[in-house]
Image (tube, helix red, strand yellow):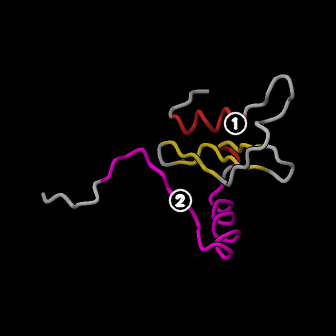
Amino acid sequence: MKITGYTEWLFFHLWKRNSETNSTCPGILIIDTIIYRWSKPQFWYFTNKDGEIVRKTKERIFNDAIDKIFIDNDSKKHGIIAKYLSTELYSAIPIPL
């Protein structure tokens, strides 16, 4: 597996099972986190009800499932649908052309 960034590296190693305990990183709770490559979802990490970190790969990630989890689930309780993080630098001041 080719890892392209620090965020992807971190989530991969939190998810990766320990060879001695055969479990993921204990005590870490991950909210639904989707990592995109080239504008397409590649990995979806979250902590399941048993406390295990789970990863879905691009073959199992569907737009309707993304809508359901981010819109139907918590937005009504917390008012937050999603947070988008990017590695691009953006200027807060418009630059005239």
Whether 42 is drawn above or below 1: the answer is: below
Whether 22 is drawn above or below 29: the answer is: above
Horizontal arrangement in the rendering, residue 66 relative to residue 17 (left or right): left
In the depicted view, which residue is nearer to us: 29 or 94? 29
Which class describes the residues within 10 Å of circle 2: few (<14), some (14-19), or many (20+)?
Answer: few
The picture places residue 76, in percent across and down from the top left corner, at 66, 76
Mark 2 secondary-structure assignment = loop
Q: Amino acid at mark 1?
A: Leu
Question: To which residue does mark 1 refer?
Answer: 14
Horizontal arrangement in the rendering, residue 90 relative to residue 52 (left or right): left
The picture places residue 45, in percent across and down from the top left corner, at 68, 46
Q: Which residue occupies the extreme left position in the image?
A: 97
Q: Amino acid at mark 2?
A: Lys
The picture places residue 30, in percent across and down from the top left corner, at 69, 49
Question: To which residue does mark 2 refer?
Answer: 83
- In 3D space, how far apart are the residues under numbered discs 1 and 2 (Cα atoms)? 20 Å
Mark 1 secondary-structure assignment = helix
The picture places residue 41, in percent across and down from the top left corner, at 58, 48
Say which residue appears at 63% left-offset and 43% top-offset.
43
Query: Magenta residues, as a range?
Result: 62-90
Q: Which image quarter holds the N terminus? A: top right
